[in-house]
């Protein structure tokens, strides 16, 4: 016969177990009883296979970031000037790569299947509550000076990479990035290389030559800096937007940083999701375009972007399943 005290002990144990189960479920992180996280299935090479329909068979050998070691081995110099190539900016670039020349971190390189999300700066992210979902991707790519502080619920807080140029660099990079965020410089003109050189080697800053004043003091760890291979700009411009690579006009046509980031993600990742992409239609003069500030399409006059052409390119990517959209389009 089981004694009364044994029954009591069993009842106590059952109660403790029940509390543990309840606590685990209510915490959602399943500390006691791990439930496998329901992540999107990731198929190795899937993004590349789908993207080849858009890009054709372009070289997958191209490095994501420019590094001194690759640069010296380049047999044929770049055919295009910035932002589509490095022609004419070689000396400046070499000086930059002598200071900062790092590759993809092992934590990304070693992933068997890379799930990536590109977070555009569009207003569609406002009140989206996508923050938690965004933080779950292996690689979160953000753009320009888009903030996370105060918007975590909608846009998340993880930032694996942030693409930027001097005029779009956040003045307070430590607040809006993680300590290991890769700050990826997209160079549009030779002065952009010069700016990063002056920042990293603390040389005399130059104020002229920018269309908007970039930070003069920029508190970042040089190990976080990467220089994006202009090849991706060439691919986005040529294959997605059919832009001419040599443009004589003053306002040169170029892809937006977001379209560039999607192009890069299709090269780097196995699964590519996007969020926060899509502009209001051209007649909508009052709709604010960003999730973090009140500006309209008018602010983009003179930018050299063709947002309707880009929308078509993104729609095509969605149709063939190369990317999936977390917001509406
Ligand atoms: C005034 C101006 O030059 N605005 C440009 C701004 C500005 O320089 C930076 O925000 C820094 O202040 O940068 C751009 O882009 P921006 O920083 O606005 O947005 C980043 C990317 O998100 C996508 N986007 C944004 C808003 C929206 N409603 N729909 C979207 O799809 C786009 O793909 C966009 O690239 C840029 O770099 O491309 C493009 C904008 O033209
Ligand atoms: C991805 O492009 C970035 C951004 O989205 C564009 O709006 C911006 O366009 C600027 C353009 O690059 C500038 N051209 C040059 C040669 O610098 C243009 O310059 C006109 C100008 C010059 C001096 C003072 C004010 C304006 O300004 C455009 C913005 O209005 O380019 C970004 C990448 O740099």
Image (cartoon, rainbow, N blue to C red):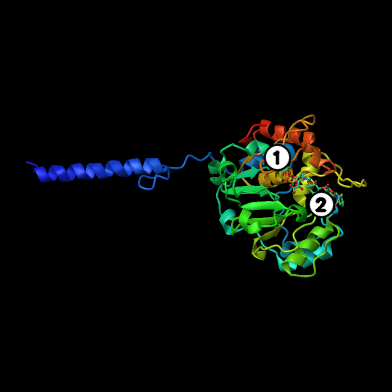
Q: Can residue 208 be seen from the camera position used here?
A: yes
Q: Position of residue 134 (x, y in %)?
A: 57, 43
Q: Position of residue 125 (x, y in %)?
A: 63, 38
Q: Quadrant of residue 64?
A: bottom right
Horizontally, residue 156 falls left or right of residue 28, namely: right
Horizontally, residue 272 falls left or right of residue 166, namely: left
Give the distance between the C-alpha atoms of the residues marked 1 and 2, in whole angstroms: 23 Å
Query: Relative to 277, does residue 165 appear above or below in the rendering?
Result: below
Question: Mark 2 Cα within 10 Å, few/some/many (few <14, many 20+)?
Answer: many
Labelled pair 1, 2 in contact (Cβ < 8 Å): no
In which quadrant of the rendered image does the C terminus lie? top right
In which quadrant of the rendered image does the N terminus lie? top left
Horizontally, residue 5 falls left or right of residue 306, namely: left
Mark 2 close to ligand 2, CB under 8 Å: yes
What residue is disc 1 on? 52
What residue is disc 2 on? 83
- Indicate which disc residue 250 carries: none
């Amino acid at each position: 016969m089981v004694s009364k005290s044994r029954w009591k002990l069993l009842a106590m144990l059952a109660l403790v177990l029940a509390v543990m189960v309840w606590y685990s479920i209510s915490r959602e992180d399943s500390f006691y009883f791990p439930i496998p996280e329901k992540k999107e299935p990731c198929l190795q090479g899937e993004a590349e296979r789908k993207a080849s329909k858009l890009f054709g068979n372009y070289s997958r050998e191209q490095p994501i970031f420019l590094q001194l070691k690759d640069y010296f081995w380049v047999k044929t110099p770049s055919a295009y000037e910035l932002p589509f190539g490095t022609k004419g900016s070689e000396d400046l670039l070499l000086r930059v790569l002598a200071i900062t020349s790092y590759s993809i971190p092992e934590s990304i390189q070693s992933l068997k299947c890379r799930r990536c999300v590109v977070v555009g700066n569009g207003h569609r992210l406002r009140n989206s509550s996508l923050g938690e979902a965004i933080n779950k991707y292996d690689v979160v790519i953000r753009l320009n000076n888009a903030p996370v502080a105060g918007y975590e619920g909608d846009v998340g807080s993880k930032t694996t990479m942030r693409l930027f140029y001097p005029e779009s660099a956040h003045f307070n990079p430590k607040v809006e990035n993680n300590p290991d965020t890769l700050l990826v410089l997209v160079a549009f003109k030779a002065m952009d290389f010069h700016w990063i050189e002056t920042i990293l080697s603390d040389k005399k800053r130059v104020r002229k030559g920018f269309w908007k004043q970039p930070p003069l003091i920029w508190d970042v760890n040089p190990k976080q800096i990467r220089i994006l291979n202009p090849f991706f700009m060439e691919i986005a411009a040529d294959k997605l937007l059919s832009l001419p690579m040599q443009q004589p006009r003053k306002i040169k046509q170029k892809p937006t940083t977001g379209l560039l980031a999607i192009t890069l993600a299709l090269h780097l990742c196995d699964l590519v999701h996007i969020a926060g992409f899509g502009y209001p239609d051209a007649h909508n003069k009052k709709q604010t375009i960003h999730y973090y500030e009140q500006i309209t399409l008018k602010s983009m006059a003179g930018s050299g972007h063709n947002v309707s052409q880009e929308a078509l390119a993104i729609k095509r990517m969605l149709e063939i399943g190369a990317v999936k959209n977390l917001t509406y389009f």
